[in-house]
Amino acid sequence: MDFQNLNRRDFLRLSGLSAAGALAAACGTPPAPGSEAAPAAAEAGGAAAAAPAPASGLRQVPREKTLILMFGGDGTQFTDTGLGNPYAAGATHQIGSAALWEPLYYYSAFADEHIPWLAESYEYNDDFTELTIQIRSGVEWSDGVPFTAGDVAFTLKMLQDHAPSLRLSTEVKNWVESAVAVDDATVKITFFDPRPRFMLEYLSFKFDTGIYIVPEHVFGELTATEDIQGFTYYDAAQGWPLATGPYKIVEWTNTQKFMDLREDWWGAKTGFAELPQVERILMLPRADDTRMVQLIVNDEVDSVLDLRASTIPETVRQNPNIITHTGQELPFGYVDWWPTSMWFNCDEGQPYAAKELRWAVSYSINRQQMLEVALGGSGEITPLPFPRYPALQPFFDAAAPLLEKYPTNEYNPEKAAALLEGQGYAKDSQGFWAKDGERLQAIISGWQVFTDIGPVIAEQLRQNGFEADFITPTDNGTRISEGVQKIWLNGHGGSFADPFTTMDFYTSKHYRPQGEPAAYPSRWRNEEYDAILDEMATTDPQAANYMDLYLAAMEIWLDNLVDAPIQQWFHRIPMNTTYWSGWPTQDNPYVNGAFWHLTFPMILRKLQPTA
């Protein structure tokens, strides 16, 4: 049978995935507009309805002035309740902190725009070893204390002193020689060697990364690492956490987090920006897709964690007020900065240490069929481990000749078979590749978000002779980090403006022996690649020789196929316009639509009451 040309129905029937329910839509059956059940739902979430009230009896805010969002937690409750300190042990970006904390600059990858915020400007010296930042006049912490260059210098010094325990502290310690407040409005950062990306990569908020600047007049009292990590920094009565953003936390339980607008926000006081129209943000823990779909279809929430490709078409069909980044049309979302690859443990002695085996896996994956079967044709494959953003497109274009030589997206079982035979494998009586009596396994692990494409890829590999399966172990992160897992699906939260950050994941400095946790766990080492990446690290991406460095490193990476690019990752986020309009879309792509990212305040500034 011609496996390559099977249609979706045949694939599901032959693989057994249909019976297993692996690709079934996660939608339940919430009432559709016009159905008998719809009036009750509309009554519960209609314009006259009140938003849920805080348990402590705080003031009531009308539903039409409340933004209700679902994200974070374990599916039933928040797991970080009360952790207002972004550097506390266990704190994550899911605490909704983006509505409170502000950066020196924002960056929008869609617009390729660097937006000054707490800072007015910055300037590097000629060799990128010094960075001088001018702080905006009139910025205040939420207790009224001025935000100054001293807070910036203090935060960087805190990270230096407590590396590697605090978030992003290792990078600051290794790269920053000193950070000094020249005066209240000027901070000067000196680096050990050129760091042309530091402002954009670390002192700007983009997606879910960036250094949180903390108030020196609070954190200056904490001297030990354990004091900082143990400081929860949440007390509504004291107004903690102090932040510069226009919202404050007024109540936080395991199931609800209320953040109210601050009328005394510095931005409005100084005339820098208008107050947002959203008076209250209510964060609820995420639920399974069925429950989240029911709530948003019934207008009870305004947006939720991104949905699977099999779920979101039904979601937008049931309520004409629900849109996505692409409206109510495919692909129902946008390209996030998390392109998916098949990752390998490349360490010596591991099955996939040989590049020939990695290429054999890649040639055995029919990516176009994967899109059709798992995603209803709504996805996009990628030949490189970068998101297709405007700033990165020139690097895709420049790599085109390399991709002809190293065709990462090619489906070619014959090439795969030749590579495996060259490594001493032969098919056993049941059609599986084996060597010395042991079958070649491809037990692919992944997060729950990969339960759409994971089973399809595993079936494709199985059809091509690998003893394959897809699993979602509860300790997936630990298995990957410590080298237990041999092959897995994962994304790349790395490059967004130039390719260096993602490519640096694969340098030898991140290598850890089997059993030791590794942040970037490919465990691949190549001295020539390391040398080129070291030079790229200190080279301005706009320099004339930068593209040549990139292509030289990329050829080494592609030849070795350190991981196998699979797809661009789409955020398919439903956004309900019943109460709020102005969401980011392809017609107005001012920022990505992930409200759990640190660019969330850019969305809050644009949202307007629908009525």
Image (tube, rainbow, N blue to C red):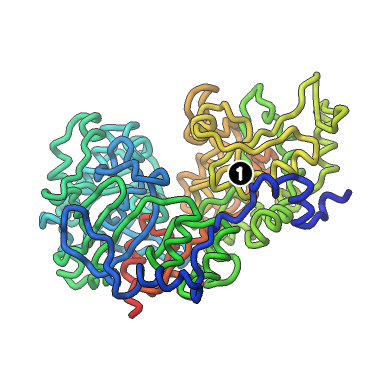
As helix, strand or loop, the secondary structure at mark 1 comes to helix
Estimate the x, y position of residue 187 in percent, counting from the top left: 23, 51
Image position of 344 with respect to 569: above or below:
above
Residue on which the image places disc 1? 553
In the rendered structure, the answer to whether residue 155 lies left or right of residue 440 reads: left
The residue that appears at 49% across and 70% down in the rendered structure is 323
Number of callouts in the render?
1
Estimate the x, y position of residue 365 in percent, counting from the top left: 73, 46
Q: Nearer the viewer, residue 340 or 369?
A: 369
Q: Nearer the viewer, residue 570 or 71?
A: 71
Amino acid type, residue under disc 1 in the picture: Ala
| Quarter of the view holding residue 224 | top left
Q: Nearer the viewer, residue 458 or 116?
A: 458
Q: Nearer the viewer, residue 331 or 545?
A: 331
Outermost residue to the top: 436
Estimate the x, y position of residue 162 in percent, counting from the top left: 28, 32
